[in-house]
């Protein structure tokens, strides 16, 4: 084979490879779009909003703390434009009040969206942290719906989030979950949740809010598929590369102030305002759980 023939062969091979890659990409994007239109037959939870002030107060606490509602949807829950994760996703959280999407949802549909990540039409919500809320007992689900219903209407609508082609590919390859309804099993038996108390058992439920960034094993490391501009979550396990040498007092101080023991401030990517809004029982429960798990070296997510 002479040089000219070899170059033609290499060029043809490269074009074939590029063509195959593009074909695979198109197929995966079409699969995502089809999944995004899938109707999920999930029953409505038997939830009705309450006007009881104690129930509403509990809902407000959940919305401001581990529920993360305020962090995503804004202080009034009237919607918020979130971060643009380059080439992956434009985050837009809708208006949950009666002046926006909340007016279209029944109490049961709103509860279903929170618990199962399903819109009123049965399709999946996008980038809703459903596993963080799916464990909530009916009492807490009632509380959060009651709080949302108690808020003044905020007029205006937010455009839906936009999943870009790269985000669709990352979802289809199991790297970056986008379709919230696919992250939970609606037929799974519901776990018995203990009363809020400063124990590892209760902390295990609260820690589900940490998994999205710190990994299933909470040992941190770069988030798969995330752009290099996103900070790298740290190790939360009691390993020497994590919280092994920390005291409970140091941990509580970081949660309350957002400042590490070495004086550095936590990266703004960490939703510190959400954690600060947690009460002492919840913070100590989270600490108890993090001390109880297996020590794992940093980066093993």
Image (tube, rainbow, N blue to C red):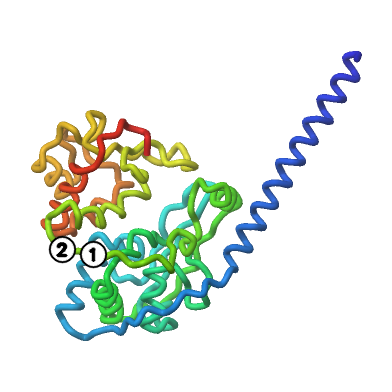
Q: Point out which mark residue 222 bears.
A: none
Q: Please, what secondary structure does the residue beneath circle 1 have? A: loop
Residue 276 picture quarter: bottom left
Q: Please, what secondary structure does the residue beneath circle 2 have? A: loop
**For mark 2, what is the residue?**
196
Does residue 169 show up? yes
Looking at the picture, how far across and down is residue 73, in whole percent?
35, 65
Of all residues shown, which one is farthest toward the top? 2
User: Where is 247 relative to 2, above or below?
Assistant: below
Instruction: Report the residue at 47% width, 64% height from top.
Output: 181
Answer with left or right where residue 15 lies relative to residue 276.
Answer: right
Quadrant the C terminus occupies: top left
Answer with left or right where residue 212 lies relative to residue 181.
Answer: left
Instruction: Report the residue at 46% width, 70% height from top.
Output: 118
Looking at the picture, how far across and down is residue 37, in whole percent?
60, 68
Residue closest to the eye, 235 or 300: 300
**For mark 1, what is the residue?**
193
How much space separates mark 1 and mark 2, taking CA atoms? 9 Å
Quadrant the N terminus occupies: top right
User: Counting other residues with Cα less than 10 Å from the Cα at mark 1, is it few (<14), some (14-19), or many (20 or more)?
Assistant: few
């Amino acid at each position: 084979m002479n040089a000219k023939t070899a170059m033609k062969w290499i060029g043809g091979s490269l074009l074939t490879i590029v063509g195959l890659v593009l074909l695979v990409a198109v197929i995966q994007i079409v699969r995502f779009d089809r999944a995004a239109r899938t109707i999920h037959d999930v029953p409505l939870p038997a939830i009705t909003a309450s006007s009881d002030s104690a129930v509403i107060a509990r809902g407000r606490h959940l919305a401001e703390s581990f529920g993360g509602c305020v962090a995503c949807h804004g202080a009034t829950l009237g919607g918020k434009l979130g971060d643009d994760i380059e080439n992956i996703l434009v985050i837009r959280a809708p208006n949950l009040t009666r002046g926006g999407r909340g007016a279209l949802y029944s109490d049961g549909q709103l509860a279903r969206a929170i618990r199962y990540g399903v819109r009123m039409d049965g399709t999946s919500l996008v980038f809703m942290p459903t596993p963080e809320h799916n464990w909530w007992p009916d009492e807490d689900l009632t509380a959060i719906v009651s709080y949302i219903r108690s808020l003044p209407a905020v007029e205006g609508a937010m455009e839906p989030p936009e999943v870009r082609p790269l985000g669709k590919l990352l979802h289809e390859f199991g790297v970056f979950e986008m379709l919230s309804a696919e992250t939970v099993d609606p037929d799974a038996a519901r776990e018995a949740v203990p009363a809020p108390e400063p124990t590892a058992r209760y902390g295990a439920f609260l820690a589900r809010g940490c998994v999205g960034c710190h990994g299933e094993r909470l040992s941190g490391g770069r988030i798969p598929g995330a752009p290099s501009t996103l900070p790298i979550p740290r190790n939360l396990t009691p390993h020497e590369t994590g919280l092994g040498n920390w005291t409970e007092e140091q941990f509580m101080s970081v949660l309350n102030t957002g400042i590490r023991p070495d004086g550095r401030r936590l990266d703004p990517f960490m939703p510190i305002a959400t954690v600060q809004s947690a009460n002492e029982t919840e913070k100590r429960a989270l600490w108890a759980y993090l001390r109880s798990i297996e020590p794992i070296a940093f980066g093993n997510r």
